[in-house]
Amino acid sequence: GAVVSQHPSRVICKSGTSVKIECRSLDFQATTMFWYRQFPKQSLMLMATSNEGSKATYEQGVEKDKFLINHASLTLSTLTVTSAHPEDSSFYICSASGGQDQPQHFGDGTRLSIL
Amino acid sequence: DAKTTQPPSMDCAEGRAANLPCNHSTISGNEYVYWYRQIHSQGPQYIIHGLKNNETNEMASLIITEDRKSSTLILPHATLRDTAVYYCIVRSWSGGSNYKLTFGKGTLLTVNP
């Protein structure tokens, strides 16, 4: 149980393109979803927290207009990287939790490469 | 956020128990200790969590000291597939009803044949 699916697993696109990443909880309802970013040889950095039906809460230094998060249902959250540039190339990982007393379960990540 | 300290790397022989230590001396009374692991190029995998009592599941055991300032994750019979970066995290409150996990650098556990 507690499976989180992330799609796509890898994206390569040109600079200036907007990219959408989907995160789905397959077998539980996720009241809260989280988006992380991981650069090579570094640890995961939390970007934002989103509760279903509410606006996402962004961590300090994360541009909310660049990283658009939508959490419209209890099983789906999306992250859109708008007008992506090479410096946005990274490993983006989502996680989902079924409640405060439930652990976060992570997707397998999306490797984004901007040329 | 309560900070955790872990050794950067450890080695373990296949079939032996792996004991991964973690210090969290600034932990608050209602903060949980979580353990995750990350195999290269994958998302982190949840292992176990606890508050005060020792915990055990099918993957591992978590031993928390009485003063809660440190804990040890035990993999009873390590296999080569247990080679990964192991993260010890104190879950902290982030406002409203939300909690967050702050990942440190973790411990790279290498299981050797």
Image (spheres, helix red, strand yellow):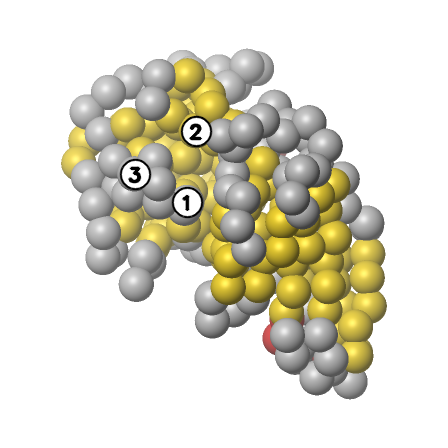
- Circle 2: residue type: Tyr
- CB-based contact (under 8 Å), mark 3 and mark 1: no
Mark 3 vs mark 1, foreground winner is 3
The numbered disc on residue A104 is: 1
Element at label 3: loop
In this view, A31 is above or below A11: above
Using a 10 Å C-alpha cutoff, classify the residue at mark 2 as few (fewer than 14 neighbours), some (14 to 19) or many (20 or more): some
Q: Are marks 2 and 3 in contact (CB under 8 Å)?
A: no
Of marks 3 and 1, which one's residue comes earlier in the chain?
3
Kind of residue indicated by mark 1: Gln
Q: Residue at x 28, y 18 (%)?
A: A55
* Residue A16 in sight here: no
Name the side, left or right, on which B87 lies relative to A54.
right
Quadrant for the C terminus of chain B, please: bottom right
Q: Residue at x 63, y 69 (%)?
A: B75
User: Share a chain, discs 2 and 3?
Assistant: no
Q: Can you identify the residue that label 2 sits on?
A: B99
Q: Is residue B58 above or below residue B72?
A: below
To the question of a shared chain for discs 1 and 2, the answer is no
Describe the element under mark 2 as helix, strand or loop: strand
Q: Residue A90: which numbered mark, if any?
A: none
- Label 1: few (<14), some (14–19) or many (≥20) C-alpha neighbours in 10 Å: many
State the CA–CA distance, disc 2 to disc 3. Answer: 10 Å
Residue B76 visible at all = yes
Please, what is the three-letter code of the amino acid marked with disc 3?
Gly
Q: Residue at x 74, y 53 (%)?
A: B21
Report, in whole angstroms, how far the alpha carbon at label 3 lies from the one at label 1.
9 Å
Q: Nearer the viewer, residue B8 or B55?
A: B55
Q: Chain of mark 3?
A: A
Residue underneath mark 3: A99
